[in-house]
Amino acid sequence: MTLYQPFLDHAIEVLQKRPDIQPYPIPVGFESKSAIVGKGTHQNEVLTTSYAYQTPKLRQIRAAHVQGGNSLQVLNFVIFPHLNYDLPFFGGDLVTLPGGHLIALDMQPLFRDDLTYQAKYTQPILPIFESYQQHLPWGGDFPEEARPFFSPAFLWTRPKENDVVETHVFAAFKDYLQAYLDFCDRAEPITDPEHLGSIEQAQLRYLRYRAEKDPARGMFTRFYGSEWTEEYIHGFLFDLERNLELNLPSSLEPSV
């Protein structure tokens, strides 16, 4: 079992217990993709698998799981709410590279500088964040341009040992996910047209930033080629803009 498989299994198990969960369409060719990398005794298979779900409040719940041996493991797990809810995004980036682990967990705010929004979605999870600081210390600088997209409860850490990931990071992942789903259960739809417009723009800002700056772009391009990678990023990982252009449902209950 790979390092992040228990994280993925837990998330899917929790989600599938929800009565309103449905599959989210994964474009053909993205459910699973493999490549052989390296040469000779260093040759290795890299396998990327995708998972996706939706609910009446959550437009897309999706995961990309990359398994490339002990020195390359990635789980990118993100939840995008429908456009008629002011919910933050759930973001989990769990990365293992030859140099160690990079862990990022957050409920990424639509409106970071709005104090009312912070009181609603950040203050309640600060105790969770603080409870893990002893075992998961701050991971150091990250890009200045990324700061507006993260909350004060952003858990960013670089543990060295696998057992820290298997225990403290896993516990934090479970707590953040449960807190997010609790927010979802309480969320009420937004009806004010101006507020709806600001939600859509905030979501698009985030998705455009993530699609443009996706740190996995180079890795995926090396493994699977540029054409597959760009379509995977824009047609699955961050597909809101494409869906809006195609007039697909984005702020209504998902079609069955």
Image: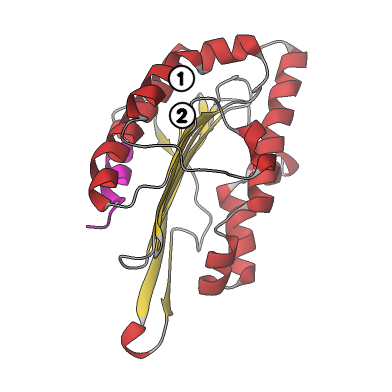
Residue 197, picture quadrant: top right
Which segment did they paint magenta? 1-13
Residue at 37% across / 30% down in the picture? Answer: 133
The structure's colour scheme is secondary structure
Looking at the image, is mark 2 or mark 1 earlier in the sequence? 2
Residue at 44% across / 58% down in the picture? Answer: 31
Q: Label 1: how many residues lie within 10 Å, few (<14), some (14-19) or many (20+)?
A: some
User: Which quarter of the rendered picture does the N terminus lie within?
Assistant: bottom left
Q: Nearer the viewer, mark 2 or mark 1?
A: 1
**Could you tell whether 184 is left or right of 208 in the image?**
left
Looking at the image, residue 24 lies above or below residue 198: below
Q: Specify whether residue 3 is painted magenta.
A: yes
Q: Name the residue under label 2.
A: 55
Residue 183, picture quadrant: top left
Looking at the image, residue 89 lies above or below residue 1: above
Q: Label 2: how many residues lie within 10 Å, few (<14), some (14-19) or many (20+)?
A: many
Along the line of sight, the residue nearer the viewer: 119 or 223: 119
> Would residue 243 be seen by someone viewing this image from the given angle?
no
**Could you tell whether 179 is left or right of 218 in the image?**
left
The circle on residue 184 is 1
* CB-based contact (under 8 Å), mark 2 and mark 1: yes
Measured as percent of width and height from the top left, residue 248 is found at 66, 38
The circle on residue 250 is none
Amino acid type for the residue under numbered disc 1:
Cys
Along the line of sight, the residue nearer the viewer: 133 or 232: 133
